[in-house]
Image (cartoon, rainbow, N blue to C red):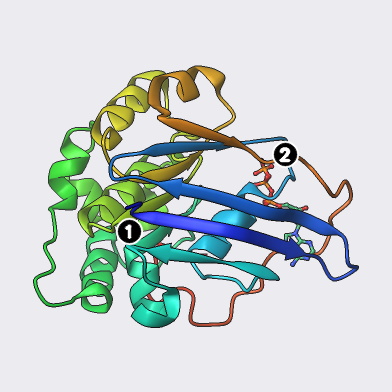
């Protein structure tokens, strides 16, 4: 059985144009599905829909055969976790965020990894996790956020250009760590797709002129916030 399945996922914009229509995908354990397509095709929006961070027009997803309603939306978001390309700036330190997020995702038998250990593999030091977010560079922030998401051990990671801010060396280190994680991975790099994909999906651009903000969060989207947008 697939770990994660989505079928018929569609998003119609306010002026009735379709951003994407009837998206179907499935992930077996350990799959990396690369999601690519032109800018504005709706890749980020699709990941947010799959994480149940924003409402969508049609379609459904299941995790281990069970619907978001079965888990409840906050638990779903902790199991099917969206990791934004650019994390928002948070108050406090990355470890404050990790400790806060742990409380939200805590379930019986839940196991957490150490984000600092993960970060060490990516040339980050412990101090990066204990200083204010605002002191981190873009690339440090991206790795720290990703390390926190990994340490929370979601079943499915929804990765929005997870190495976009990284140099080539860090990119390869992150790819190595992510190998074997069940994930959907947005990238614009064909080379990266060749390295990481076990399957691919292209989202075509249906709507050429979408302009409304995509911030339709229902307000509870970010309790966990690695979905921190
Ligand atoms: N609810 C909405 N109403 C209207 N437009 C929307 C809505 N949600 C998203 N859009 C628009 O749809 C487009 C798709 O945005 P999205 O960020 O998902 O694309 P993308 O494929 O990830 O692009 P990129 O590769 O540039 O990151 C954007 O123009 C966005 O503003």
98 displayed left or right of 15 = left
Residue 102 circle label: none
- In-front residue for pair 118/28: 28
Q: Position of residue 222 (x, y in %)?
A: 45, 73
Instruction: Indicate whether 105 appears above or below 172.
Output: below
- In-front residue for pair 2/119: 2
**Visible in this render: residue 48?**
yes
Q: Position of residue 209 (x, y in %)?
A: 89, 50
**Visible in this render: residue 224?**
no
84 displayed left or right of 13 = left
173 displayed left or right of 229 = left
Residue 167 picture quarter: top left
Instruction: Indicate whether 177 appears above or below 158.
Output: above
* Pair 2/1: label in front: 2
> Is ligand 1 closer than 8 angstroms to the Cβ of mark 1?
no
| Sequence-first tag of 2 and 1 | 2
Q: Position of residue 85 (x, y in %)?
A: 50, 47
Instruction: Indicate whether 65 appears above or below 145.
Output: below
Q: Secondary structure at mark 1?
A: loop
Instruction: Indicate whether 154 appears above or below 162.
Output: below
Residue located 49% across and 53% down the image: 84
> Circles 2 and 1: CB distance less than 8 Å?
no
Residue located 29% across and 57% down the image: 155
- Determine the CA span between mark 2 and mark 1: 32 Å
Residue located 57% across and 64% down the image: 49
Q: Secondary structure at mark 2?
A: loop
Mark 1 crowd level (few <14, some 14–19, many ≥20, 10 Å Cα):
some
Say which residue label 2 marks. Answer: 39
- In-front residue for pair 71/103: 71
Residue located 40% across and 20% down the image: 195
Say which residue label 1 marks. Answer: 132
> Is ligand 1 closer than 8 angstroms to the Cβ of mark 2?
yes
């Amino acid at each position: 059985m697939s770990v994660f399945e989505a079928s018929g996922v569609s998003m119609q914009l306010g002026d009735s144009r379709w951003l994407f229509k009837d998206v179907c995908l499935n992930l077996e354990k350990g799959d990396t599905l690369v999601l690519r397509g032109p800018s504005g095709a709706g890749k980020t929006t699709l990941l947010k829909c799959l994480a149940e961070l924003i409402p969508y027009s049609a379609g459904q997803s299941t995790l281990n055969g069970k619907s978001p309603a079965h888990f409840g939306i906050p638990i779903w978001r902790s199991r099917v976790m969206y990791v934004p390309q650019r994390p928002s700036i948070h108050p406090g330190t990355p470890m404050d965020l990790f400790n806060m997020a742990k409380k939200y995702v805590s379930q019986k038998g839940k196991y957490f990894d150490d984000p600092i250990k993960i970060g060490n593999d990516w040339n980050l030091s412990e101090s990066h996790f204990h200083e204010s977010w605002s002191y981190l560079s873009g690339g440090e922030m991206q790795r720290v956020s990703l390390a926190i998401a990994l340490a929370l051990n979601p079943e499915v990671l929804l990765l929005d250009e997870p190495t976009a801010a990284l140099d080539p060396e860090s990119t390869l280190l992150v790819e190595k760590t992510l190998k074997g994680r069940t994930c959907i991975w947005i990238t614009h790099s064909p080379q990266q797709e060749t390295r990481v994909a076990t399957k691919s999906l292209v989202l075509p651009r249906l709507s050429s002129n979408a302009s409304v903000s995509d911030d339709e969060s229902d307000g509870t989207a970010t309790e966990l916030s690695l979905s921190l947008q």
